[in-house]
Amino acid sequence: MDSCIFCKIAKKEIPTEPVYEDEYTIAFNDLSPQAPVHVLVIPKKHYASLNELDDKEIMSALFGAVKNVVKKLGISEYRTVINTGESAGQTVFHLHIHILAGRPLKWPPG
Ligand code: 5GP
Ligand code: ZN
């Protein structure tokens, strides 16, 4: 998607320091961090949300990427979030997994 900001990050059209990267995924720091650690993991291929994701290889790669990110950051306690749809808080319509850590995180969320 030409206009998608995360596609631009995935294609390195916007300079980004990846926290982690492989063939299928890239992880980078959130622009507006909500915790001391706030990393986004995205598939390089555009999927508007989790609802559109139909490729098991990419599903597996995304979970693998999360595990690689937390290993790289040396953390074992963290929250993962996927907001799907506007009413669930999704604002960027390219699938992404939030990884949040570094402060106490309340449950249930707001
Ligand atoms: P959502 O609300 O869709 O679940 O999360 C979108 C996230 O993307 C937000 O936490 C927001 O701060 C982050 N974000 C939006 N635009 C950019 C950007 O251009 N670069 C980075 N690194 N993060 C972004
Ligand atoms: Zn995209």
Image: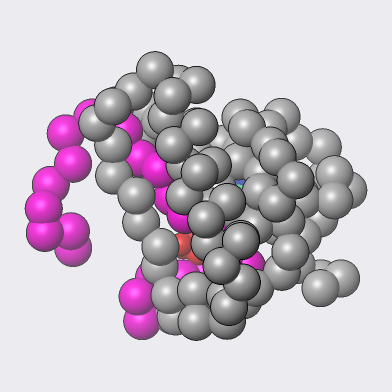
Query: Where on the picture, by quarter, is residue 79?
Result: top left
Residue farthest along the front direction in this orientation = 57
**Residue 24 coordinates in the image, percent (x, y):** 70, 51
Drawn side of residue 23 relative to residue 11, left or right: left
Asked whether residue 38 is drawn in magenta, I would say no
* Point 40% across, 43% down: residue: 99
* Point 56% across, 36% down: residue: 29
Q: Is residue 9 above or below residue 4?
A: above
Drawn side of residue 29 relative to residue 73, left or right: right
Q: Quadrant of the C terminus?
A: bottom left
**Residue 38 coordinates in the image, percent (x, y):** 44, 38
Looking at this view, is 59 or 35 the one in front? Answer: 59
- The segment highlighted magenta reads 87-110
Q: Is residue 95 above or below residue 31?
A: below
* Point 49% across, 74% down: residue: 50
The answer to whether residue 33 is seen in the rendering is: no
* Point 42% across, 29% down: residue: 70
**Residue 45 coordinates in the image, percent (x, y):** 74, 64
Q: Is residue 84 above or below residue 60?
A: below
Q: How many labels does the image show?
A: 0
Magenta stretch, main secondary structure, is: loop
Residue farthest along the top direction in this orientation = 74
Drawn side of residue 89 relative to residue 16, left or right: left
Q: Quadrant of the N terminus?
A: bottom right
The answer to whether residue 22 is seen in the rendering is: yes
